[in-house]
Amino acid sequence: MNKEMLNLGNNRSIIRELFEFSKTQKSILGAENVFDFSIGNPSVEPNQCVKELILDLLKENDQCQIHGYTSAQGDIEVRDAIAKDLNNRYKTNYDSSMVYMTCGAAASLCITFRAIVESNEDEILAIAPYFTEYKVFVSSTGAKFKVVPADLKNFQINIEEVEKLINKNTKGIIINSPNNPSGVIYSKENLEKLSTLLLAKEKEFNHPIYIICDEPYREIAYDGIEVPHIPSIYHNTIICYSYSKSLSLPGERIGYILTPNTMDDYKNVYAACLGAGRAYGYVCAPSLFQKVIAKCADKTSDMEAYKENRDLLYNGLTKLGYECVYPQGAFYLFMKSPEDDSFKFMEKAKKYNIVLVPSDSFGVKGYVRIAYCISKDTIINSMPQFKKLMEEYRK
Ligand code: PLP
């Protein structure tokens, strides 16, 4: 047996662990008495067009075609619709030959890493705080996973720290913005500085250094802040997208990889993704949902609900004296633990039936992540509990 896989299977991620803990507590205490901020499961309904399309598709005569295999890279109709939507939004010139349909962002990332990693010497960088599964996905290709320390002031990309870590073995850097867990959106200026650095390093080492842009929260941005389209800033960018959050479809496993024509060698990168998808046995993303996305590519769920939650939570917690990073997007709030050890804080919060995720597995110590993709009532009713929790520290 592969010991690494055995270990992964036997040890759930802390988020999954807390999610299971919440489920047990809810069955004992009643769902309304547990304030579960553990997991990023969307709480707003999918756009109405999703339901209507599924019902229509299930009425079609040829059900074998609806549920059948598609091309390995996905139906031409959905890939075409995605390319057109991106072109409308970003004034780009993409087409279906650059889009590869996948089973969500996780599959997009695994395929991309497999496609670009050549040897165990290769290194992939992630910027703290980062989505915990990156380490698992990168390590499983044999490449080394390196962490760029967080910019604890602004939670932007710390360019000097990136520079220190880049060497001839660097294959790529993962960018996730709006960020899980900080909720921060990397500014255009910050990304331009990164682009300048990467271009210089590509020249120095004479090989591509890819940005792997993981953007499942692209559409969840507040206060009119624009999420920069990274291929327009840096040429060697591969986009890993998912409809899990923007259309509230995480269980349906649908997303895509875009290998844009801004890249030096985009046709071969696309072919390597096809190869990696084949090697993993990931070909042909769910066909019913490919057909749904072909008609809903330009739609989202109602993102205003998350903004209301953001405001309630941020204002409520800061008023109680908690120190929070102001979330500009996604549906996570990053809060400073009132004591250095965020695991101890998590345990104390549990006494008040508040379930928070300690930040250590995101590559930063001393914070907790609060997922606010939950009902408004849960946020409102959690405030007296957060107050009691803070009082413990003030005693
Ligand atoms: N990347 C980030 C930053 C995420 O937060 C998630 C899920 O929460 C994923 C990737 C995986 O998304 P998917 O469900 O589409 O596989």
Image (cartoon, rainbow, N blue to C red):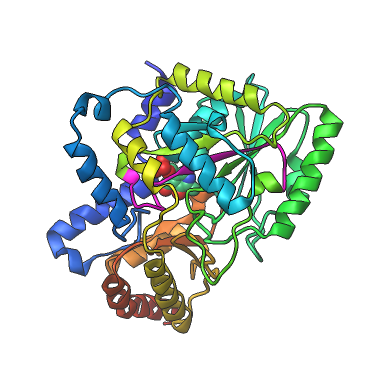
Q: Quadrant of ligand 1?
A: top left
Q: Which residues are magenta?
A: 233-250
Query: Residue 81's spot in the image, x, y percent?
Result: 46, 41
* Residue visible at 28% across and 71% down in the picture: 378
Residue nearest the observer in this picture, 5 or 351: 5
Query: Residue 322's spot in the image, x, y percent?
Result: 48, 76
* 256 in relation to 345, above or below: above
Q: Is residue 165 left or right of residue 343?
A: right
Q: Is residue 372 covered in magenta?
A: no
Residue 178: quadrant of the picture? bottom right
In this view of the protein, can residue 106 be seen by the observer?
Answer: no
Residue nearest the observer in this picture, 340 or 219: 219
For the N terminus, the image quarter is top left
* Residue visible at 24% across and 43% down in the picture: 54
Residue 357: quadrant of the picture? bottom left
Query: Residue 257's spot in the image, x, y percent?
Result: 52, 35
For the C terminus, the image quarter is bottom left
In this view of the protein, can residue 224 be seen by the observer?
Answer: yes
Q: Which SS does the magenta portion mostly show? A: loop
Q: Is residue 234 covered in magenta?
A: yes
Residue nearest the observer in this picture, 110 or 225: 225
